[in-house]
Image (tube, helix red, strand yellow):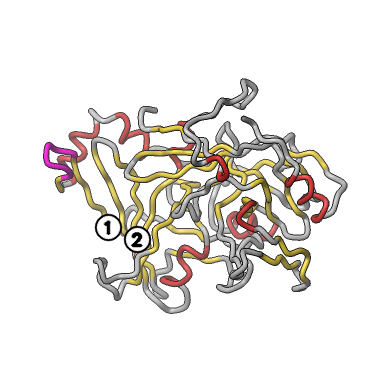
Amino acid sequence: MGKFLFLFILTFLAALPSFAQEEEELPVREDAFLVQKEIQIWRTDKTYDTQAEVYACQAVRLHKNWFLTAAHCVYTACSGSQPCTVQITLAEAELRQTVRIHHSTSSQRVFIYSGFYPGQNRVSSVDAALIRFDPETAEYSYAAQGKNGWKSVPQEQFSALLKDSPETKAQLSAYGVRLIGAANLGNSRFTAGIVVPKTVNGVVTYLQSPSDDIYFIEKLQHFIAPGFGVRRGNSGGGVFTPQGDLAGLVSALMYSKNGSASFYDAEGKAVLTLQNAHDYFMFTGFNGATLNFIRNKVPSLRVIGADMGFVEPVHKNFEEIVQLINGAPMRL
């Protein structure tokens, strides 16, 4: 697709002008990332202007009526009895279509995983939320690109122009990604590789992991890899394989003032503290709990187990895996 721009950034090499890639790097199926959408969330009782607190995130369109994002993206605006509004950019090429979804206690459209609470370690594999998109009740807006920028157009004009914008049509029709389930998975190395896309103003850029050392940690129920440049606003977006299967979601990591991060198991016992947490990329996987949460809402969800060729067992504990990652070779 013409809207893609390939970015491959290593955090510690960001200042260098260029670097070479090895030939064995897996090819990336870029059109698979069209399922990722730009979203904005705010409290409905607040005006959406410069005075409002608007949360900018990403979401993955799992189904024509369902979007998956991170719980922390919607929790502040949508939890409890607060009415909130979620705006999703369904497409933005020569034409733009956005939709506003209104959530309230009487008309629930945002569903946050019940085990998520703010202030906890958010990479504990519970940072997930679903957004229900009902075409009959949603509030649409349409725009066309002109000489002086975007111009609002009625639905009839948008529909007439759509036939001449294959890029817009491709974005509107993209949904139905396959998930890689990590239920009952022990400590494992993820062998498929990962790609992290981001959609902004209709343009998808993506980062590909600079290392093959990506691990699933059984105690924490999430993935860890050598750090690379996941950008602000990526929260809720997908972590894909190069071929377009969804391995997890970009979550958020909480750091202390000295840059360390502590991790806890299900009983609240500290497992390990990373002293330089910014050096790692950790993302939520689909374990039994989060996978069941999604399955209970999304019909016809396509899932394949991680043990079906995506991982290999690693007979090492968390501390040993971190040591492996710290010594991991980077593809340069």
Residue 305 coordinates in the image, percent (x, y) = 71, 43
**Upstream in sequence: badge 2 or badge 1:** 2
Residue 236 visible from this viewpoint: yes
Above/below status of 59 relative to 4: below
Residue 86 lies in quadrant: bottom left
* Residue type pointed to by label 1: Glu
* Residue type pointed to by label 2: Ile
The single residue placed furthest to the top in the displayed view is 23
What kind of element bears circle 1?
strand
Q: Nearer the viewer, residue 9 or 70?
A: 9
- Residue name at image x 62 percent, y 71 percent: 120
Q: Is residue 290 magenta?
A: no
Q: Nearer the viewer, residue 306 or 218?
A: 218
The local crowd at label 2, few if under 14, some if 14 to 19, many if 20 or more residues have their Cα within 10 Å, is: many
Above/below status of 56 relative to 169: below
Residue bounds of the magenta highlight: 145-150
CB of mark 2 within 8 Å of CB of mark 1?
A: yes
What kind of element bears circle 2?
strand
- Residue to which mark 2 is pinned: 101
- Residue to which mark 1 is pinned: 139
- Residue name at image x 76 percent, y 40 percent: 307
